[in-house]
Image (tube, helix red, strand yellow):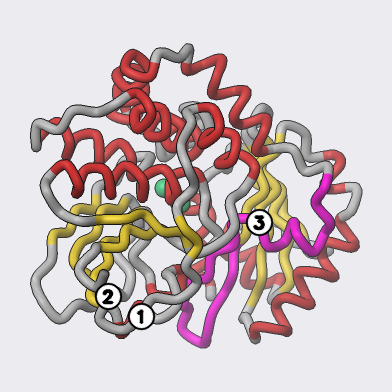
Amino acid sequence: MENIIWVAGHKSPDTDTICSALACAYMLEQEGKAAVAVRAGELNKETQYALAKFGAAAPELKTEIPAGQPIMLVDHNESKQAIDGLKEADVVGLVDHHRLGDLETEKPIFMLIEPVGCTATILLALMRQRGIEIPPTIAGLMLSAIISDTLLFRSPTCTERDRQAVEELAAIAGVDYAEYGMEMLRAGADISDLQPADMVQTDKKEFAVSNGTISIAQLSVMDTAPVLAQKEALLRELEADRAAHSYEASFLMVTDILEEGTQLLFAGDAAKVAAAFAAEAADGEVYLPGVMSRKKQVAPPLLGAF
Ligand code: MN
Ligand code: MN
């Protein structure tokens, strides 16, 4: 068992983390290695929709990794976002599209980080390079990942390579990606059963700052009105979560996929938030028109300000 490589994405898994873990495990197996995709948290509705659409089973839930267990990381590289126990595990590889964080390894590893919209886009290039054939199910999962991360090409993180990858993968999977993509995003944007306490945990990521940690969650919806109607409760939950984890500040991006903008709710120092975005930040909120990407448009200014 010990030699089977775990392939894992980040906590609060999103569609890229799950689908790229599955695709990467498939790639390793095609190269004769024993690999299994695992997940460090519950599936969101969008990911469940994608897995069902292409008939794929979810990776097994693993909240902690045993010491010495070989692991390949996809879609993240910061220890705060990784499966518990990573420090004592044996990281053997990394494929990612985020800033380089605090990853340390004992041995040299295979590592590929590129500034594209999605991990699956990088995996597609790797599979092409290695002459690995991509079956329709894996192609469907990979295109789902790219559509999710780029919000169907709307995010400023989206590159020409991501667009081309989706076209190529759609031909293999046999889907109309524009139509399927909207269906998948709509499935993910269904917040009808979410309480404010759940909303502030959606897709939450932690980032190390000079005096501690900040958290940034993101809720992507087709209409922000039903979410913002609960603003007071959301701010209370953000403050409770901030206090519970001793975060410097807690953020919730309420992103409108169709209008292409983000209402950023927060608990923390309003002056620092205002400075980060050179905007007015009153009553725990700041509106950021055109902002859709945490990685490219929200995390960098906040990491600078905190
Ligand atoms: Mn991700
Ligand atoms: Mn990603």
Q: Give residue 12's quadrant in the image.
A: bottom right
74 sits to left or right of 260: left
Which residue is denoted by mark 1 in the rendering?
66
Distance from label 2 to label 1 (Cα)?
Answer: 6 Å
- Would you say residue 36 sits in the magenta stretch? no
> In the picture shown, does residue 239 fall above or below 189?
below
- The kind of residue on which mark 2 rests is Gln
- The kind of residue on which mark 1 rests is Pro
- What residue sits 44% from the left and 37% below the top? 145
11 sits to left or right of 106: right
Q: Position of residue 115 (x, y in %)?
A: 29, 46
Which residue is denoted by mark 3 in the rendering?
202
The answer, for residue 300, to whether it is visible in the render is no
Q: Are marks 2 and 1 in contact (CB under 8 Å)?
A: yes
Q: Position of residue 64 (x, y in %)?
A: 45, 76
246 sits to left or right of 161: right
Q: Give residue 3's quadrant in the image.
A: bottom left
Q: Residue furthest front?
A: 1
Element type where label 2 sits in the image = loop
Distance from label 1 to label 3 (Cα)?
Answer: 27 Å
Check mark 1 vs ligand 1: CB closer than 8 Å? yes or no: no
Element type where label 3 sits in the image = loop
Which residue is denoted by mark 2 in the rendering?
69
> In the picture shown, does residue 298 fall above or below 83?
above
Query: Which range of residues does the magenta coloring cover?
Result: 193-216
- 75 or 114: which is nearer to us? 75
289 sits to left or right of 170: right
Element type where label 1 sits in the image = loop
Sort mark 2 into few (<14), some (14-19) or many (20+) by Cα contacts within 10 Å: some
- 266 or 278: which is nearer to us? 266
- What residue sits 73% from the left and 84% below the top? 243
